[in-house]
């Protein structure tokens, strides 16, 4: 497997197929997609939007975290415990929004390590994922969390579509 992270802007040419090609080699196990975030904050709804889009596309793997059933700071520990018990041999792809540098906003990164939800806003929550897909949605402004409330929904929607479509691409390849 590839060992370093892959990164590109969501609106780059062929971003869906490039991400899908990168993810495809992982599609030989029981896939479990865990989408983290809440619909109560535009900047943090990337994960649940991806989960909802995958459900709507009839993605044939286990999907946790949607707009109707989000996985967020309040329920993440119990949801992760449930997922790990229900799928002890599952390969977990975790998806979350992230804050970063100004030049990185709009980038999607695939990392060969877990996600540490809430880290960017100073929360200590359990990690999740064999690989992680993060979307950098805004600039980091310390641990205020204020930034996540000033993100444009159109950016989140576009990034979510690219991530969801890349997972479907990886599956169909």
Image (cartoon, rainbow, N blue to C red):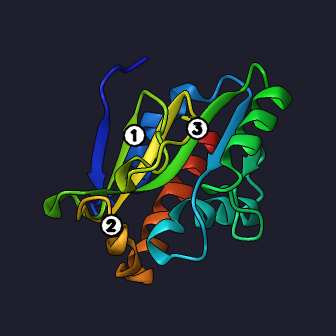
Residue sitting at 46 percent across and 61 percent down?
A: 162
Above or below, comparing residue 168 to residue 25 in the picture: below
Residue sitting at 61 percent across and 73 percent down?
A: 39
- Circles 3 and 2 in contact, beta carbons < 8 Å: no
Closest to the observer: 100 or 135?
100
- Circles 3 and 1 in contact, beta carbons < 8 Å: no
* Mark 1, secondary structure of its residue: strand
Q: Label 1: how many residues lie within 10 Å, few (<14), some (14-19) or many (20+)? A: many
Which residue has dot 1 on it?
110
Instruction: Tell me the number on the disc at residue 93.
Output: 3
* Mark 2, secondary structure of its residue: loop
Q: Label 3: how many residues lie within 10 Å, few (<14), some (14-19) or many (20+)? A: many
Closest to the observer: 146 or 152?
146
Is 32 on the left-hand or right-hand side of 157? right
* Mark 3, secondary structure of its residue: strand
Say which quarter of the image contains residue 3. Answer: top left
Q: Label 2: how many residues lie within 10 Å, few (<14), some (14-19) or many (20+)? A: few
* Residue 127 place in picture, x, y as percent: 54, 34
Residue sitting at 55 percent across and 27 percent down?
A: 130
Q: Earlier in the sequence, mark 3 or mark 2?
A: 3
Which residue has dot 2 on it?
144
Q: Nearer the viewer, mark 1 or mark 2?
A: 2
Q: Earlier in the sequence, mark 3 or mark 1?
A: 3
Is 47 on the left-hand or right-hand side of 16? right
The answer, for residue 20, to whether it is visible in the render is no
* Residue 35 place in picture, x, y as percent: 61, 52
- Quadrant of the image for the C terminus? top right
Figure label count? 3
Closest to the observer: 104 or 72?
72
* Residue 17 place in picture, x, y as percent: 43, 49
């Amino acid at each position: 497997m590839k060992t370093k992270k892959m990164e590109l802007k969501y609106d780059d040419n062929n971003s869906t197929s490039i991400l899908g090609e990168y993810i495809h080699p992982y599609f030989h196990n029981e896939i479990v997609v865990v989408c983290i975030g809440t619909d109560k904050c535009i900047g943090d709804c990337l994960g649940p939007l991806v989960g909802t889009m995958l459900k709507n596309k009839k993605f044939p793997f286990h999907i946790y975290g949607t707009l109707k059933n989000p996985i967020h700071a309040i329920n993440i520990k119990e949801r992760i415990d449930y997922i790990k018990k229900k799928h002890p041999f599952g390969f977990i792809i975790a998806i979350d929004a992230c804050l970063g540098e100004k030049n990185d906003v709009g980038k999607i990164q695939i990392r060969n390590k877990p996600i540490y939800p809430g880290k960017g806003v100073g929360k200590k929550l359990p990690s999740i994922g064999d690989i992680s897909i993060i979307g950098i949605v805004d600039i980091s402004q310390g641990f205020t969390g204020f930034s996540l409330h000033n993100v444009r929904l159109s950016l989140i929607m576009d990034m979510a579509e690219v991530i969801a479509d890349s997972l479907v691409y990886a599956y169909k390849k």
